[in-house]
Amino acid sequence: MLKKNNFSGAILIFFGLSFYFFVVQEIQASPSILSCTPDPITHKEVVEITGSGFGVKSPAAPLRYDDFQNGVEGNRAPSEALGGWYTETGVVYDDTYQRFENDMCLQQNFNTNGGGYNQTIGLTSGGALQETGKLYMHAWWRIETWNHATRNCKILNIGVDIGSGDWNSRMDLHPASGDGLMNILAGCPGSVQVVDYVDWQKVLGDDGNWHRVDSWFDGNTGYRNYYVDNEVISIVAHDPPRSVFTDCVNPYIGYAYFGHYYTDDTYDPDPMAQRWYGELYVDNTRARIELGNSPNFETCTHREIQIPVAWSDNSITFTVNQGSFSNGDTAYLFSIDENGYTSDGFPVTIGIKEENHHKPDVPVGLRVE
C-alpha cells in the first residue's frame, strides 16, 4: 500500500512538473516590452526598446523596405540591384493620392498611361530575396478601376518562374465573373494544389480607400495567410504539411510580385486600373515591430510597421515610421517574434514629425465596414 501511494505521488509530481514547464514555456514564448527610449517617439527617429523574448532576427533589417519619399513625380523607381524594385514600364512615382500630406507613392498603370496588363513591382531570387523559402509581404495600397471588369487580376504572386508550371502561390481574382481564390500549388512540376475561395471585392479594395495588406508564406510547410486592414481574409494550408519545393532544382522562392497583372483581353472597352503603393516591406521572417492604436494587437484597427536596425533577444533598435498617426496620439508598440508570438502593447506618445512628414488624411481608421 505504501509503495502504491509513493508511486501515485510520483506520477502526480511528474505531471505537475510537466504542466509547470509547459506553462512556463508558453509564458516565455511571447515577447515582452519593458521600456522604450526615448518617449515621445518622432518620425524617422532611432528608438530602442528593451524587454525579453524578442527572439532572433539576423540581419535585423528587412529584405526590402521602401516608402518612396525620395521619388520624383513621373520617374521610375530604382532597379532591384540599386535598392529598388523589379518593375515594368508604366510603374512610376505619383502623388495623385496620398495617405498623408505630401506623401509620394509608386503607381501601376494597367492598360493606360503607357502601361500594359503586366505592371510588375517585386523582387527576385537573383536580387533581394536571397534564396529564401519563407516570405512576409506587406503593403499599403489604393486602386481605381474603370471600363469593363477584368477577366483576371493577380495579387501577391510568388513562385519559381512565371508560367513554368512549377510550384506557385497567389491571389487570383476574377471580377468579371465575380469570384476569387488563393492557392498553393506544390512540387516541381506542380502536382498538388490547395485553394481557398475569397471575397474578391474586399481583396481588390476598389472603394476609394487606402488598405493595408499583409501575407505570410512558409514554403517548407505549404502554408499561407492573407490579411486586409488587419482582418484575416484567407488561410491556405496543405494538410498534412508538405514542402512546396519537392523535386525542385532550386528549393526557394524565385520571384515575389505585388499586384502585377490586370488583363485587358475578352472585354470591350478594355479593363483599366491604376494602383498606388504608399509603402512596401518584404522580409524572410515574421519577426518585426509594429505601432498600433490599441494595447491588444488583435483589436488594432490601425497599425504601422517599423523598420528594425538592430535586434537581440532583449533589445531592438528601430527607425520610427509614423505613417498616418497624428502628433500627440497615444499608440502601442508591439514586438512579434519569428514564430508569430506577439507582445502586449507598450504605450508611447507620438511626438513632433520632421518637416517633410505629414498630417493624416481624414478619416484615419483603416477598417472599411
Image (cartoon, helix red, strand yellow):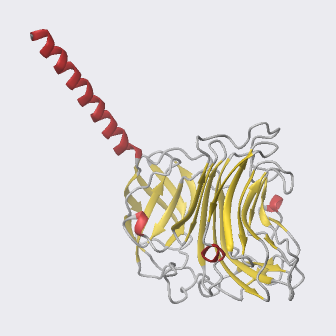
Residue 67, can we see it? no
Could you tell me which quadrant the N terminus lies in? top left
Classify residue 271 as left or right of residue 228.
right
Up-down relation of residue 337 to residue 361 (above or below): above
Q: In x, y percent, where is residue 124?
A: 80, 55
Residue drawn at 23 percent across, 30 percent down:
16
In the image as oriented, which residue stretches furthest toward the front? 177
Name above or below for residue 159 compared with residue 3: below
Q: Is residue 281 left or right of residue 308?
A: right
Residue depicted at x 40% and y 61%: 36
Answer with the quarter of the image where residue 321 lies: bottom right
**Quadrant hosting residue 293:** bottom left
Q: Is 71 or 153 nearer to us in this picture?
A: 153
Is 358 situated left or right of 142 in this image? left
Residue 157 at x, y percent in the picture: 74, 61
Report the label total. 0
- Depth check: give the residue in front, 12 or 186: 186
Determine the image quadrant of residue 15. Answer: top left
